[in-house]
Amino acid sequence: MTRNGFVDHQEPGLSGEVVEASTGDFLAQSLELDGAPPFGAFVEVAGDDALTVYAVVAHVQTAGIDPGSRAIMRGHGDVRDERIYQENPDLPLVLRTTFRALVVGFADGQRLHQFLPPRPPRLHYSVFTCPPRTVKRFTRESLDYLQALLTAPEVPSDELLAANLRYVSTTTGDGQEFLERAGRELAQLLRADYARLTAILRRCLAPVEVP
Amino acid sequence: MTSRLGLLVAGSVAEGLSARLDPAVPIEDVRLGKFVKIVGQKYEYFCLVTDVQLDSANNDVLRDPPGDPNKVDAFLRQVLSGTTTYALVKLKPELMLANLAADVEFEEADLVPRPARTIPPHFSNVSEATLTDFERVFGRDDGKNHFQIGQPIDMEVPVCLDLRRFVERSNGIFGKSGTGKSFLTRLILCGVIKAQAAVNLIFDMHSEYGWSAKNEEGTEVKGLSQLFGGRVAVYTLDMESSRGRGVKPAGEIKIALREISVADIALLQDELRLHRTAVESAALCEDKLGADWVARLLDMNGEELTDFANLEGGNHASLSALRSKLRLIDRLPFVERSLERSTLDQVIAQLERGQHVVLEFGRQRNLLAYILAANVITRRLHELWVKKTEHYWNTKDEADRPRPLMITIEEAHKFLNSDAARQTTFGTIARELRKFYVTLLVVDQRPSGIDAEVLSQIGTRITCQLNDERDIDAIFTGVSGGSHLRTVLATLDSREQALVLGHAVPMPMMVRTRKYDPVFYAAIGADIPEVVFARSRRYEEIFGDE
């Protein structure tokens, strides 16, 4: 697989680099084309100080590197799918995968907080997919971050929530126990919107493979 | 330490409180009549659960319930329970007591339980009451002032009656037949006798209190005389029947005709099917013929009766009818034309000495015999106790203070129905309260048959299961907050459960009544074989074999 610039770097969990940052979310370019962390996954960006920002992948996009240019159809005859990439080795150089992550909390030193950090992550810093132990630690104490996912603008928030809950339940291995806890929390948050609650919970129950 | 049930969310003093049940508490563990505590900022409140409700934060859930047995709906139900759908517990605050943990100076009065006149703030903790809470409220069975009547429905802690308060007023034990009234009565009598709170006279219509009787399972249970030996004497109206059951009565009761008064006849109006004018005719006879009026009227032949009617202005037909009805009394085996020595005096002297008396009726268990004998004896006792009390008022000497006397009557509605209550001694006793140190223990299965005025004076009501609406209404005559308790009463089991409310308990309480069995005998200090043997010997020494 071709890498977006990081050809020889092999740090485990490394997923990309921050290319646009704000208080509520950041955009990262994925290390590999089509290699973004899964939708709903937890990612982290550490700073030089003790501040580590945690975020949930809310949107993944692959498009041309040049914002002005759009990808065109390259297939012809029986050249389709993977063969197109083989015939056009320049494609990984003109295409890139980016993902947008919603900031849901941060750690300052030992303490975890599930609200927005004082500063956004720094541009060009590395984005890592959180290891299961971090996901477990983040979700163990509280599930206040679900409120942030629920009210996130411009993302399919119901899908995002369901994807995140599925991700956590399979990554941490807590499965049903976590889903029940999260379900209760959601039931509290969505006590006025029963239809939305059931829609989200139904989506949570489908099992998902951890990549 | 205390197990939390939920949080207080709404309520008022008048309407009661609502608490939201914690999701972790199974709703089915919270039953009506449960005793719970709410810790407020200044006071602790003791409440009864009067209702349990299902509620939901969102009605959409109820319109489209997750009822499918599939995985998703099962998960939904699990997630919703305790959050969107939850249980509300309705509570009736009964008592408040100083919260000793609070940093507040309390007055003396705050340290004893008193009726709740305010409510705790929002989100106060609602928890199960502990043994300590029960002891603070109901006291501890100390063999003197407090007597354990049973346990709460769902806990293993004692619920006690305050016996001093209990004997201060007339009391009632109610419940439809077969609910264990007579066992409950026996239990309470044991408590009163053990604590010497009052001297007891028991009109034992079915001959079951004095000596052993069979319970519903057919096992023999001990009578009061077996448990307390010489302190309880059994008298009988039917020596043959008593002997036949192995009882050794202290004496046989006979009633002389001259011991019967107009008031006794008035009470028998129903049983004898007397005409309304009969009582007037009887009064006329008593006036003109003197103490022996019954005998003299019975002995008159037709001519003498006509002469008497003409001479004294009586109605011949009425007198004649009265005479034929009085024959029914004359024919009762325990009624004698005349007696050398009044056997009633013997009983009365016994009671004056502080010995308890059970009066067995043997085969004389028809109402005519029962009402007549009970009323004749009670009238005499009441007159005596009134005299004693008046004497005590004059001398103000503690030694002259009459012993409290408690008279147990079954089928009480026969004595205390709205007609009889106005004219009989029983009605007077029930209304006069403790003024003359005589009170009633009324045992009845139809409380609605008892005069409302008498019912409102009943101090402590111990009620087993009742089904009839009118009977249930009657129980709550003169009780504030009765509507809350109705639902509690309606859920009593048919056996060994009772609702206790009134003067002798600080708050109404639903109890599993104590079992009347060897464990109980031992607890009240009886049934140690040597003691029983010694007692029986002493008994024979005192009263002889005959």
Image: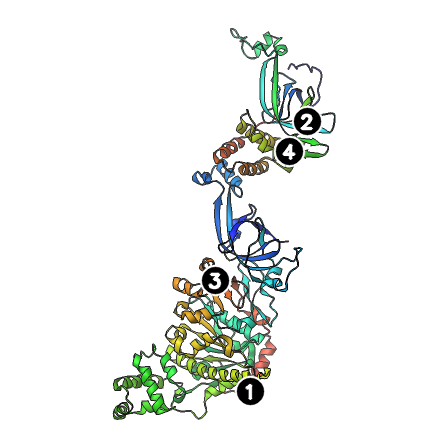
Q: How many marks?
A: 4
The residue under label 1 is: B542
Q: Chain of mark 3?
A: B
Q: How far apart are labels 4 and 3 at the CA level? A: 53 Å
The residue under label 4 is: A114
Q: How far apart are labels 1 and 2 at the CA level? A: 101 Å
Residue B194 visible here: yes
The residue under label 3 is: B480
Q: Which mark is residue A210?
A: none
The percent position of residue B306, horizontal first and vertical second, equals 25, 91
Q: Chain of mark 4?
A: A
Q: Are marks 4 and 3 in contact (CB under 8 Å)?
A: no
Nearest to viewer (mark 4 / mark 3): 3
**Residue type at mark 2?**
Arg
Q: Which mark is residue A119?
A: 2
Q: Secondary structure at mark 2?
A: loop
**Residue type at mark 3?**
Ser
Labels 1 and 3: the sequence-earlier one:
3
Q: Residues within 10 Å of mark 1 (few under 14, many from 20)?
A: few
